[in-house]
Image (cartoon, rainbow, N blue to C red):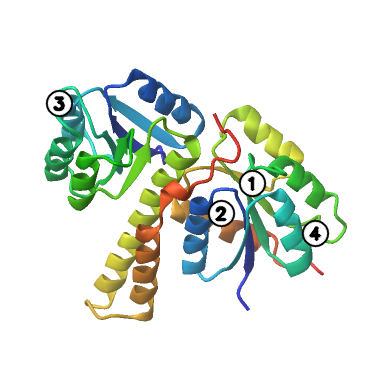
Amino acid sequence: MNKRILVVDDSPAIRKLVSFTLEFAGYEVTMAEDGVKGLQRLQAEAPFDLVFVDIIMPNMGGLEFMQKVRADATHGALPLVVLSTEGRDEDIQNGTNAGATSYLVKPFQPPALLAKVKEIMAEHQPKESV
Amino acid sequence: MSHDTQVLLLDDDDAVHRFFQDAATRCNIQVTSAHCGREGLAACERMYYSLIIIATTLSDMDGLAALLALQKIAPQSRYIMMTNTPVDAVLRKAIAAGAAGTLFKPPDLDQVMAAVQKSEVVRYFAEALENALYRSGGRTTKESRKAKQGLQHAEQLECSDAQHTTPKT
């Protein structure tokens, strides 16, 4: 069974570009346009192996999304990778404080994105339990 | 070695240059500023840019003339035209001449990032397709089909659909 990845980003173009890249590498991708929808997808369509999340989004941003996931008994250990336009040191620190496993700054280089996914998947072998 | 996307910007509007330079302080892009067509051509002679953004109007030539001249120097680069209005004769001709997309002024970080990201993903799939065909001696394989499909999807993606629901400036 393919590894499953949730992509949470408010830009339709970025969501699709991340999705094309991940699907080409054999991952199954689910998309959500903000943190609220992301949490809904996470609850309704689990299990996932990894989540990419943008920081600045309407309704619920990435920092709040990650805090809620980390506080959740079922999904709290899920790898969360920020993919954001905000790449200053304080932005990365805020992401880490909110629970990010890793932080990538846009635009991503597809080989670097896939290498990061592979690295994190290797570190978090067992799929989260539902 | 930097992994930033190298962007060349041709525009005579200082505000647009400030916007891109500010974006470069936080995103993974390196922006070289050219304030007219001649400066852009000179910059392009010096190094490779994966993405070249050209205003449809420049002080010394129009954007179409700049595009055609730059394409001769840097055929591998991807080109985006930037305009004030969707109804723009130069823009239409530039798209017909091979420009990959359009940005509207004033630029918006979401739209710019989608355009830059598209150029990176298109390049990735183009290289993957080339490598797959090289390995198979030109025969179509499952790998080359997947790469071709990814390339088509990425090339056809409309970046102006980047929603601006939240200001990111």
Residues at marks 4 and 2 on the same chain: yes
- Residue B102 falls left or right of residue B74: right
- Which amino acid is tagged 1? Ser
Residue at image coords 18%, 40%: B67
Residue at image coords 45%, 55%: A111
- Which amino acid is tagged 2? Lys
Q: Position of residue B108 (x, y in %)?
A: 47, 34
Spot the residue most to the top: B14
How much space separates mark 3 and mark 2, taking CA atoms? 40 Å
Which residue carries the number 2 mark?
Answer: A116
Q: Position of residue B35 (x, y in %)?
A: 25, 22
Q: From the viewer's perspective, is residue B148 above or below residue A21?
A: below
SS state under label 1: strand
How much space separates mark 1 and mark 4, taking CA atoms? 17 Å
Q: Determine crowd level at label 2: few under 14, some 14-19, many 20+ residues with C-alpha closer than 10 A.
A: some
Residue A102, which numbered label?
1
Labels 3, 2: front one? 3
| Residue B117 in view | no
Which residue carries the number 3 mark?
Answer: B38
Labelled pair 4, 3 in contact (Cβ < 8 Å):
no
Q: Nearer the viewer, residue B84 or B116?
A: B84
Q: Determine crowd level at label 4: few under 14, some 14-19, many 20+ residues with C-alpha closer than 10 A.
A: some
Which quadrant of the figure contains the N terminus of chain B?
Answer: top left
Labelled pair 1, 4 in contact (Cβ < 8 Å):
no
How much space separates mark 4 and mark 2, taking CA atoms? 20 Å
Q: Chain of mark 2?
A: A
Q: Position of residue A49 (x, y in %)?
A: 68, 64
SS state under label 2: helix
Residues at marks 1 and 4 on the same chain: yes
Residue at image coords 37%, 69%: B147
